[in-house]
Amino acid sequence: MTRLILLGPPGAGKGTQAGLLSEKLGVPHISTGDLFRANIGEGTPLGLEAKSYIDAGDLVPDDVTVRMVESRLAEDDAAGGFLLDGFPRTVPQAEELARILDGLDQRLDAVIQFDVSEDVVVDRMLSRGRADDTEEVIRNRLAVYAKETAPLLDHYRDKLIVITAEGPVEEINERTMAAIGEAR
Ligand code: ADP
């Protein structure tokens, strides 16, 4: 299994797990949040467009996000697989992803859901101190997740692997590797 989507609320630890999985599976970690932050850091037009949405905890519009992901997935290192972290985040984005993968003649292997309680999520986000991790913005991101992203769990029900994402980082990684292995 090398073509994977990582799903879960903000603060679920997707980025941390994606880093470990990326090394073990030998496929790139593609995080839309990281791509947006890199663009903001470099002051690109895409970064300028995305910044106000990210600062408010709102979703960046689909057309901007989809274009960015489409060009990233077309790069050579993603030909053998990828870990998508933070995309898709809406059902229309999932439909766009299906179109992109069709065009590349690729199939999604699985969608990994990192399941974690809301209390743990808020604690983790408040402790990492990112610019968009103030309490008000966190609350909005969680509301956006419940409304826009949670419906993807049903959308992808046939490919879903649920991982309990509480406890030590290494244990969560082991559970995930085992689940991917079993489903192979
Ligand atoms: P977290 O998982 O903690 O929410 P991310 O780094 O994944 O953090 O995302 C940070 C912000 O980037 C989001 O709040 C949103 O504004 C924007 N973003 C990331 N991915 C997407 C996406 N697929 N669609 C729209 N906006 C996105």
Image: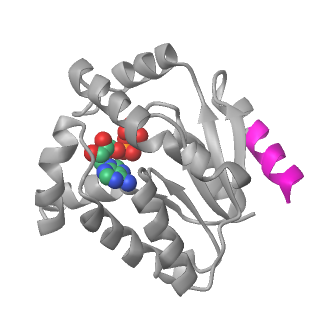
Image height check: is 64 above or below 99?
Answer: above
The front one of 174 and 140 is 140
The front one of 115 and 155 is 155
Image height check: is 139 above or below 183?
Answer: above
Instruction: Note whether residue 18 is visible.
Output: no
Q: Position of residue 167 (x, y in %)?
A: 66, 21
Q: Is residue 100 magenta?
A: no
Q: Please tell me which residue is depicted at 55% across the width and 19% down the height of the picture.
A: 117
Q: Which residues are magenta?
A: 174-184
Q: Please tell me which residue is depicted at 18% across the width and 65% down the height of the picture.
A: 46
Secondary structure mostly seen in magenta is helix
Q: Please tell me which residue is depicted at 48% across the width and 13% down the height of the picture.
A: 119
Which coloring applies here? one colour
Residue farthest to the right, as pictured: 182
Q: Position of residue 84 (x, y in %)?
A: 52, 58
> Where is residue 64, by image quadrant?
bottom left
Quarter in which the C terminus is drawn: bottom right
The front one of 131 and 158 is 158
Quarter in which the N terminus is drawn: bottom right
Say left or right for 91 vs 114.
left
> Where is residue 133, by image quadrant?
top left
Instruction: Note whether residue 36 is visible.
Output: yes
Say left or right for 42 vs 176.
left
Q: Position of residue 157 (x, y in %)?
A: 68, 48
Q: Please tell me which residue is depicted at 62% across the width and 66% down the height of the picture.
A: 27
Q: Position of residue 2 (x, y in %)?
A: 69, 65
